Image (cartoon, helix red, strand yellow):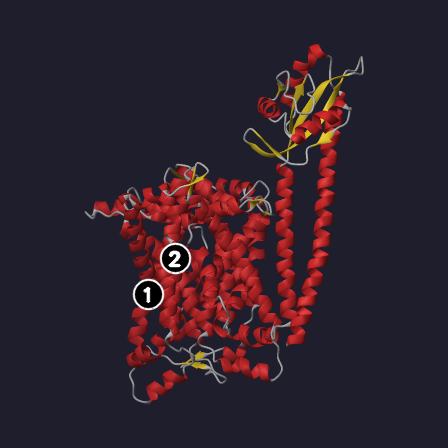
Amino acid sequence: MNKRFINFLLTLLFVILVGTWIYTSVRDEFLKQSRTAQRRTVETVAAGYPEPEDVDDWLKRLADEAREYSVVFVSEIPMPGEKLNAAPKGDKELAELTEKSALDLEFSKGFDNAAYEEIYRASNNWTVGTKEKQAIFFAPAVSLKTHEIEGALVFAFNTEGEQNFMRMLNTLFFGAFILFAVVIWQLMLSRDPIVGFALAGLFLMTLVFVAYPLFEALRLSFVENGKFSLSIWKTILNSEGYLSALWGSLKLGCWTATFSTIVGFLFAFVVARTNAPCKKLISTMGVLPVISPPFSLTLSIILLFGNNGLITRWLRVIGLDFSIYGLPGLVIVQTMGMFPIAFLTLSGVLQAIDSTYEEASLNLSAGRFKTFSSITFPLAVPGLLSSWLLVFTTSLADFANPLLLAGDLKVLSLESYIEVTGMNRLGHGAALSILLLLPTLTAFLAQRFWVSKRSYVTVTGKPSGRITELTTPLVRRILTGIIFVIVFLLILLYGTIFAGCFVKNWGIDYTFSLENITEAVTRSRDALFDTVTLAAIATPIAGITAMIAALLIIRRKFHGKRLLEMLLMTPFALPGTLVGISYILAFNHAPIILVGTAAIIIINYVIRELPVGIEGGIASLRQIDPSIEEAATDLGADQATVFRTIVLPLVRPAFLSSLSYTFVRSMTAVSAVIFLISAKWYHLTVLIYNFSENLRFGLASVLSTVLIIIVFSAFGLMRLLVRENVNLMKSVN
């Protein structure tokens, strides 16, 4: 070990020496070219020095044309140790500096060189007025007629470009050194380099794309007028309106998470653990709400149940007064839109439960309900808690539904959105959004504490190929009936979207028309291509990364595990508006410039949707006996082979759910993407939102329908690419 460590230090020393040589070479060459270009500019400008009577006009013209430098003219060059005899002409701030610093050693050298018809660059940078780090040059002002020196020209060049390049260069070489150090450490000292590289990659990803943007947002909440200040937080914490919004968010999140988890568990249980009919229809309808943009479902509900909705009008005729606005309406809408999160998470968990325990319970004369309550339900607790947490964080971060349905209910996500987009107070919006982290992290830690106290292993080396039917025909019919009521409501809502494709403008003009289809397809061609391309790139990256992260969190012990978990879960709790703004703040300048590129949108997709895949993977891995992986390792398989041939097939349901959810959310993202799109990379949901905002519901309906068709097609393709493991297929007894 000592020899390996010494070799590591020697290798690291060699990397430092080579890196230092490369760094100094690049830095010196860049500074040389930059200063050479500045000197050529000085020579060119000085060569155009006019006659004395035209100096004022010449200086004015230079001030109007030049952006990277300013210039003043000193009519009488002072002797060393003497003050100026006449005030300099030209740029006011540079003139003040020249007059004030005439006795400075650098200025004396500069004037002395100008007197000998030489150009001189001051060795240090100077502050000219409010502009810091300006490069100062001195040049002679030579008459074209007499060829005599009539004074000196003093130039001040803006070195902001040099500073930005140097910051980028420093960051690049520092990052490269850290990367080389990690790689060398893993290759020379680590027992399992693959795991080490995976951990290093995850930490680097979270630090750059989670912690850094979040720090920018946090910093913004403590800055006012460019200076550190606590006034924003004092205003928020002393405001009853903002505290009321926090309480409103908590109420909405708790109710939505609870009802969504119940409905999601009902769908998942009927599909995975019963012989109920129409399972494919139930599964399809169970994922339908996450396929369309959230505001499409909300608009459908308003058109049906709003103040002037079709169903609301009918209810008023029979004497019932109903309002969808406020907390009850928001809970209903969010539950309908978010229960698929729980359904997708719980489906994999319930499918993976080994029925051997249930069969043993029934053989020991326990009833079906007793078996369910003591065996099946407790084993599903990790998935239930994960589902609740994911829906809770989604509800807190949602602003599209509250924007349309909140009524008199205040929620933090909407207040944050209004502060940022309506009042242009980025600091207030960032602070309000950061408040949402407190309940989210509290729920996250509580869930982890609860799950860590129990064991949920059910998948061992010999899993059962059967699923025990725990419901009687009557109970099965009741559960199926409840599900079909929910399915009917979903069909009604999405039927409204489909019907909107064939009317001129829903709610205004119900005339049958096909014009919307032609116009929508024509206007959305580029946005549709961009949306599908970006989602297709982000989906496999997010899915594989989520499974790797879940495996490391569950199967490995390492320093910083809790920190890594929190960083991976944090983006899901942040409002999309804050994520979009923080990404713009973080990646719109050196050293990482991503704004306007496809990369920043893809990174946003991957980072934002990782928690769903990680939670699903963790819930599934808790049920798998580690001895299966240990046996493969003992037989000589490396970690990559174990992950590919053992872990990934066993967590296939969770992996497929992660892929599906990431693709869906990428295709239907709104809040963060609306800040990150550019002229080159547009997004279909933003176009749908614009159509909806302009009351072009027909066009929005067409694009929403197209979006649903694309996503369902992608679902089928994913199931073909990620085939189900025949060894894990189960039949219901």
Quickly name the residue at label 1.
Answer: 262
Q: Is residue 581 above or below residue 614?
A: above
**In the figure, is residue 594 to the left or right of 217?**
right
Residue 345 picture location, percent across and down: 43, 66
Q: Is residue 157 above or below residue 558?
A: above
Of the 4 image quadrants, the one containing the N terminus is: bottom right
Q: Quadrant of residue 202?
A: bottom right
Q: Judge the density around disc 1: few (<14), some (14-19), many (≥20) Cα neighbours within 10 Å.
A: some
Disc 1 and disc 2: Cα gap in Å? 16 Å
Q: Judge the density around disc 2: few (<14), some (14-19), many (≥20) Cα neighbours within 10 Å.
A: many
Helix, strand or loop at disc 2? Answer: helix
**In the figure, is residue 44 to the left or right of 297?**
right
Depth check: give the residue in front, 371 or 674: 674
Residue at image location 80% in from the left, 13% down from the top? 146
Depth check: give the residue in front, 422 or 303: 422
Q: Is residue 246 visible?
A: yes
Quickly name the residue at label 2.
Answer: 393
Give the numbered dot on residue 417: none
Q: Label 2 sits on what residue type? A: Thr
Q: Quadrant of residue 128?
A: top right
Depth check: give the residue in front, 410 or 478: 410
Residue 554 picture location, percent across and down: 48, 72
